[in-house]
Image (cartoon, rainbow, N blue to C red):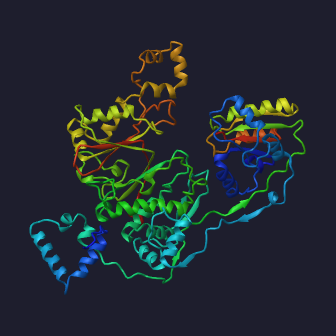
């Protein structure tokens, strides 16, 4: 008894094609298309999908042949290394700016840092500031203020 | 980093969710050793007491006590590495790759050069063939692309770079001018924001028929080659030409968006516009015979299949009142031609008349108004009019028009407000349906310039 196996359509098609002799299947298909065309009906519609109605021949498999392709990446900008600022010997007696860049909660968290310094290092003076603009904008006015009055900065991104 | 450049030590604090982003950003801006201290994530919902406990705890990355680490960041002498100067170039890999087709498909996929679906491998021959789709020279620099201009690096790219990515997406040379125009807007399809932006790209003018864009049945679906490959090309080129789409580094959308696979690549159904209604590109100052690509930015789209007893323009007005998403101040309506015709029959002689009507007549739900107008809420509670009356009305919609261009939500109204609602007509007239979303118009670019 022949085993019934549901196989993908492309396998069934290959088997059907193999079963025909001397192009009989192709001839029959052409006639069907002609009839459908005369009736004003697209053969693709009756077949359910254009891919099934008109399967394209697949190119021969490349096998292990190697090919060369190109890198699709654009041009990232060169990066100029910036030396970090010299560190302070101590924070005693220094002024630290606590700067929020505006993310929700950063102001409250920096306030807790100010409280921590009051409790644990009371000689440190802290000044809270909210940076103007969005998180990636510069704030020249604030930078000038820190330059004039500050020694260091702690910046909080929140989230 | 600005403060470090001025000569003042800095301790940046970042939540752990952005560890890779912060380190990568510091490196790409020239300070790979920046002394970043990390906090738990999220911080926004913590009480003051919980925040103080964070200070007394450990940095979740280094596992060292946080406050001593912050103090050390400001006081510990610099290492030789931290003092380094000079220039470095990011590694983008070799100019070519060699292997079998399977090996190369895997290589492009594993190196985040694709949208993780199989690509057309960009051989030199295919790229040369693609370049025949434009009169521009391959080495012409088009512009810059970034995952977030100002916050992320801006990459440069040429016509040839775009052609390579167009090949990968499965595009044909006739599609290249459109893809070049999209790239020339400088807009990435994958924006880095945590809010999972999505983009929409629309074609207008003769190009739509020339390349056989589908703007009929299923205009927004996978039913035509140019819609599919042009939209796809935008995402692939955003990754490769702008460094976009590296999850955790240049892309942070927490949920992401499936729209990013194709970016809602559409063409307006210009031949079904009611009399007097201008095609979108003509509304933006182009001539009817110009071929133009327009870019929109937003998050979500609501496809509405509903047969109302009221006219559609009233239904959409009510939808605008109650539609809520991240973007609550701009909207784009995509109307099937049947809906557009009905609006014309109801007396709307242009898209502008319709969008002005919607901006003027739509309102704001009470909960949304009060949530975004805390200052007015206090005034309402103090008996100041008209806010006090709004508050007395309970859950009734507030007569506050959201859909006007403003600097930010809740900001002062413009003295000459313009509607922030865009109207697009597309679809196959198989039913009276429409879609609306929070997309806002970004820019347009000539396609003809890139032929």
Which quadrant holds residue B304? Answer: top left
Q: Position of residue A54 (x, y in %)?
A: 24, 72
The spot of residue B147 in percent (x, y) is 56, 54
Q: How many marks?
A: 0
Residue at left offset 22%, top offset 31%: B309
The residue depicted at 31 percent of the width and 52 percent of the height is B268
Residue A22, image quadrant:
bottom left
Q: Residue furthest top?
A: B383
Image height check: is B19 above or below B321?
below
- Residue A6 visible in the picture: yes
Residue lying at the far bottom in this picture: please name it.
A22
Residue B308: x and y in percent read: 24, 34
Q: Is residue A77 left or right of residue B395?
A: right
Q: Nearer the viewer, residue B250 or A44?
A: A44
Q: Is residue B443 visible?
A: no
Q: Nearer the viewer, residue B141 or B69?
A: B69
Q: Classify residue A92 as left or right of residue A99.
A: right
The correct choice, above or below, for A64 with respect to B30 in the image is below
In this rendered view, identify the residue nearer to me: B209 or B58: B58
Residue at point 15%, 78% (across, down): A28
| Image quadrant in which the C terminus of chain B is located | bottom left
B279 to the left or right of A150: left
In x, y percent, where is residue B280? 34, 49
């Amino acid at each position: 008894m022949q085993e019934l196996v549901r196989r993908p359509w492309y396998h069934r098609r290959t088997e059907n094609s193999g079963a025909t002799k001397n192009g009989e299947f192709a001839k029959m298909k052409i006639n069907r298309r002609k009839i459908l065309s005369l009736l004003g009906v697209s053969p693709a519609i009756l077949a359910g999908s254009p891919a099934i109605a008109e399967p394209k021949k697949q190119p021969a498999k490349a096998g292990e042949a190697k090919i060369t392709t190109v890198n699709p990446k654009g041009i990232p900008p060169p990066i100029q290394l910036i030396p970090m600022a010299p560190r302070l010997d101590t924070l005693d007696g220094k002024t630290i700016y606590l700067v929020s860049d505006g993310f929700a909660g950063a102001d409250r968290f920096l306030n807790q840092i100010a409280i921590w310094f009051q409790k644990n290092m009371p000689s440190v003076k802290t000044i809270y500031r909210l940076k103007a603009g969005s998180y990636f904008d510069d704030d020249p006015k604030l930078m000038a203020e820190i330059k004039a009055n500050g020694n260091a900065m702690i910046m909080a991104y929140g989230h | 980093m600005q403060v470090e450049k001025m000569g003042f030590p800095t301790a940046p604090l970042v939540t752990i969710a952005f560890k890779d982003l912060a380190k990568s950003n510091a490196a790409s801006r020239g300070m790979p050793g920046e002394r970043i201290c990390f906090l738990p994530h999220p911080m926004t919902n913590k009480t003051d007491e919980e925040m103080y406990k964070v200070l007394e705890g450990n940095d979740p990355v280094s596992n060292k006590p946080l406050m001593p680490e912050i103090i050390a960041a400001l006081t510990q002498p610099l290492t030789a590495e931290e003092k380094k100067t000079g220039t470095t170039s990011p590694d983008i890999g070799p100019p070519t790759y060699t292997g079998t087709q399977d090996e190369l498909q895997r290589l492009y996929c594993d190196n985040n050069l694709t949208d993780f679906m199989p690509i057309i491998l960009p051989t030199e021959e295919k790229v040369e063939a693609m370049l025949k789709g434009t009169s521009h020279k391959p080495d012409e620099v088009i512009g810059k692309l970034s995952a977030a201009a100002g916050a992320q690096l801006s990459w440069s790219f040429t016509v040839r770079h775009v052609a390579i990515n167009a090949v990968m997406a499965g595009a044909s040379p006739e599609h290249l001018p459109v893809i070049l125009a999209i790239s020339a807007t400088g807009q990435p399809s994958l924006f880095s924001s945590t809010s999972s932006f999505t983009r929409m790209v629309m074609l207008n003018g003769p190009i739509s028929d020339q390349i056989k864009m589908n703007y009929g049945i299923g205009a927004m679906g996978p039913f035509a080659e140019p819609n599919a490959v042009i939209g796809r090309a935008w995402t692939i080129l955003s990754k490769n030409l702008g460094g976009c789409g590296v999850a955790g580094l240049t892309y942070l959308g927490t949920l992401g968006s499936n729209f990013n696979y194709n970016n809602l690549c559409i063409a307006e159904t210009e031949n079904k516009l009611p009399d007097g209604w201008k095609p979108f590109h003509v509304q933006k100052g182009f001539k009817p015979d110009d071929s133009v690509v327009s870019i929109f930015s937003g998050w979500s789209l609501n496809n509405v299949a509903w047969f109302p007893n009221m006219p559609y323009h009233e239904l959409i007005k009510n939808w605008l009142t109650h539609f809520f998403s991240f973007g609550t101040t701009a909207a784009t309506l995509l109307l099937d031609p049947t809906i557009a015709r009905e609006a014309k029959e109801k007396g709307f002689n242009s898209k502008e008349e319709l969008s002005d009507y919607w901006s003027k007549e739509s309102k704001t739900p009470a909960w949304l108004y009060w949530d975004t107008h805390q200052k007015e809420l206090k005034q309402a509670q103090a008996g100041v009019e008209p806010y006090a009356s709004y508050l007395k009305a309970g859950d009734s919609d507030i007569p506050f028009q959201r859909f006007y261009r403003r600097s930010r939500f809740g900001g002062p109204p413009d003295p000459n407000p313009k509607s922030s609602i865009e109207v697009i007509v597309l679809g196959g007239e198989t039913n009276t349906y429409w879609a609306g979303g929070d997309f806002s118009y970004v820019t347009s670019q000539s396609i003809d310039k890139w032929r």
